[in-house]
Structure formats: structure tokens, C-alpha cells
Image: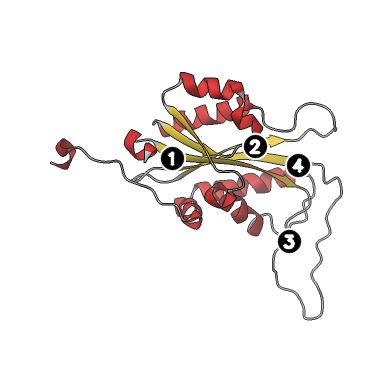
Amino acid sequence: MTAAALGAFLVFEDEAGFGMTPPQARTWGRRGHTPVVRVRGRSWRRYSIAALCCYRPGEPSRLIYRPRRHRKYRGRGRNSFAWTDYRDLIVRAHIQLKAPIVLVWDNLNTHRAAGMRRYAGEHDWLTIVQLPSYAPDLNPVEGVWSLLRRGPLANVAFTDDDHLEHTLRRGLRRIQHRPALIDGCLTGTGLELTRRPTTPQEDQ
């Protein structure tokens, strides 16, 4: 109701990590011969993706994301997203959507950082709503991760981390260009959008 009253986009956020070891999925094979995918080691080579699923009645649904490649050497630099990374992603979404945002995300410590709370309090276009603890089934971005793992990432023998990055970006672009897939991720949560109430002048 908050997003509808403000004429805002309802924006869900989540992040996930992807490594050189691919997710397994069903595939075809000769009878009696189990398919085997041989992969390279160094599973610490990983990518993290923070993604936003953006919804507003009457508008095509959007997917906006920010990738982060983990350092090749352990112990050097930060691998996880800082609160400033989330802030920059949300600002980018605001610029693209050209509308207020009601942001829905989980209780990750970085989401609740003092800087993030202060930034939200200083900008009236941003409203933050925390999801209940342990409620991934209410976040449509989980559906995006499922589409990637069951689709372009499934059973792939990545040659190197550049191959992994290329595959991730190609899969995300495919979802971006198909708003119906993003709508399906929201439908999978059981949530529905509420249209903004109209005034008597708008009804005429």
C-alpha cells in the first residue's frame, strides 16, 4: 500500500554468490552412462551479484544489478558489498526509474548500517521496508537466481573466471529483456501489486 500511495516502484533487493563449480541440473545422456561435467579447481574464484527487481502497475518490470568480482588473492581487499555499494545501486535505480522507491530487503547487517539508515532518512524518495527474518520465499529476486542456476549456469564447465562473468552477464541481460520473467518471479512469491488510488479528478 505504501508504494501505491506514493506512486513509487516497489523494489526488492537480494544478493548471491556464484563460483566456478556449476549448479547441477537434469540433462540428457546415454542410457547407463551418467553425464559428468569436469570443472577446474580454485572454487574461491567467485562473483557476487546484488540485484533489484522493480515493479509498478502499468510499467514494464525491471531488473537492475551490480556485479562484484572477488579478489584473486585471499585476504586482500573486501569481497562483500559495503553499504555504500548498496547505496550506489539504489541511486542508480532511482535515476533509471525516475520515481520514488519503496525498497524491500532482508535484515543483513550491511543493510542496517548507520550510514544506510542516515541516507534513507535524508532522501524522501527512498522508503525502506525490512523483510521478516528467514523469508526468502517473499523475495522475487530469489526467482532470478533460480532462473540463472537452472538455465545458463547449469552443468557448465567454466574455463576461467572471465567465462563465468560472461555467462552471468548474458543470463542477466536475457532476463532484463523479458519483463514477463521478472513478473513471474513476483508471482512465485504469492505477492500482488496494488494500484495507486485515484482521485475524483483522475476518474473523470
Query: Which one is in front in this view, the residue at disc 2 or the one at disc 1?
Result: 1
Image location of residue 80, percent across then percent down: 71, 33
In the picture as drawn, the residue positioned furthest to the left comes out as: 204
SS under mark 3: loop
Image location of residue 70, percent across then percent down: 76, 35
Instruction: Tell me if residue 159 comes above or below residue 25 in the rendering.
Output: above
Instruction: Tell me if residue 53 comes above or below residue 97 in the rendering.
Output: below
Q: Residues within 10 Å of mark 3 (few under 14, many from 20)?
A: few
In the picture as drawn, the residue positioned furthest to the front comes out as: 133
The residue shown at (53%, 50%) is 138
Residue under label 3: 24
Image location of residue 6, percent across then percent down: 34, 33
Q: Residues within 10 Å of mark 2 (few under 14, many from 20)?
A: some
**Mark 4–mark 3 contact, CB under 8 Å?**
no
Q: CA distance from mark 3 to mark 2?
A: 23 Å
Give 192 or 26, whichever is nearer the viewer: 192
Q: CA distance from mark 4 to mark 1?
A: 29 Å
Q: CA distance from mark 1 to mark 3?
A: 32 Å
Q: Amino acid at mark 1?
A: Leu
Q: Amino acid at mark 4?
A: Arg
**Mark linked to residue 46:** 4
SS under mark 2: strand
Q: Report the side of 3 relative to 122 (left or right).
A: left
The way the protein has been coloured in the rendering is secondary structure
